[in-house]
Image (tube, rainbow, N blue to C red):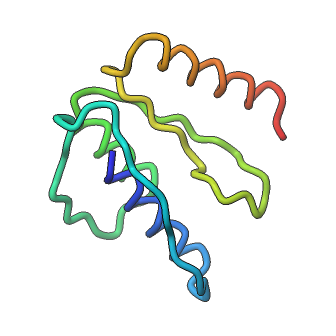
Amino acid sequence: MAVMATLYMNYEMARDPKRNIGFAGDVHGPDPANMIGPLDERNKTMQELLNIIAERSRGGMWVGMQRPVGMQSLPWEFLEYQRPEAQGVGTLRWITDWMRYPH
């Protein structure tokens, strides 16, 4: 979901307003038909935004993740329900391992 990339970039910019480096990479979602938006949400918490994304998508859930300080990664994982089963199971296994054995 491209919205996740946008949310992440805005999250990082809000977290560190003095950030002087940009973002690069590819954004590939498992289902291009699972597009939401446009969104014009203001004064919302991260939880509220993630809930809005999950509610407006074709189905999904998000899980909060406590990441080590300085780790350049999302503080959440978003699982789209229409993912292939093996991919969804693998992601859930990764999340539970992360929670069980924090890095």
Q: Residue at x 35, y 29 (%)?
A: 60
Relative to 103, residue 60 above or below: above
Q: Residue at x 62, y 53 (%)?
A: 73
Toward which corner of the image does residue 16 lie, by quadrant? bottom right
Q: How many marks?
A: 0
Relative to 41, residue 36 above or below: above
**Left or right: 77 in relation to 32:** right
Relative to 81, residue 27 above or below: below
Judging depth in this view, the residue of 55 and 89 nearest the camera is 89
Determine the residue located farthest toward the top in the rendered image.
85
Relative to 45, residue 75 above or below: above
Q: Position of residue 65 (x, y in %)?
A: 64, 41
Q: Position of residue 47 (x, y in %)?
A: 45, 49
Judging depth in this view, the residue of 69 and 91 nearest the camera is 91
Q: Residue at x 49, y 66 (%)?
A: 24
**Quarter of the image containing the C terminus?**
top right
Q: Position of residue 94 (x, y in %)?
A: 66, 25
**Left or right: 13 in relation to 35:** right
Q: Residue at x 76, y 63 (%)?
A: 70
Toward which corner of the image does residue 69 lie, by quadrant? bottom right
**Quarter of the image containing the N terminus?**
top left
Toward which corner of the image does residue 5 lie, by quadrant? bottom left
**Left or right: 44 in relation to 103:** left
Judging depth in this view, the residue of 73 and 67 nearest the camera is 73
Q: Position of residue 68 (x, y in %)?
A: 78, 53
**Left or right: 38 in relation to 74:** left
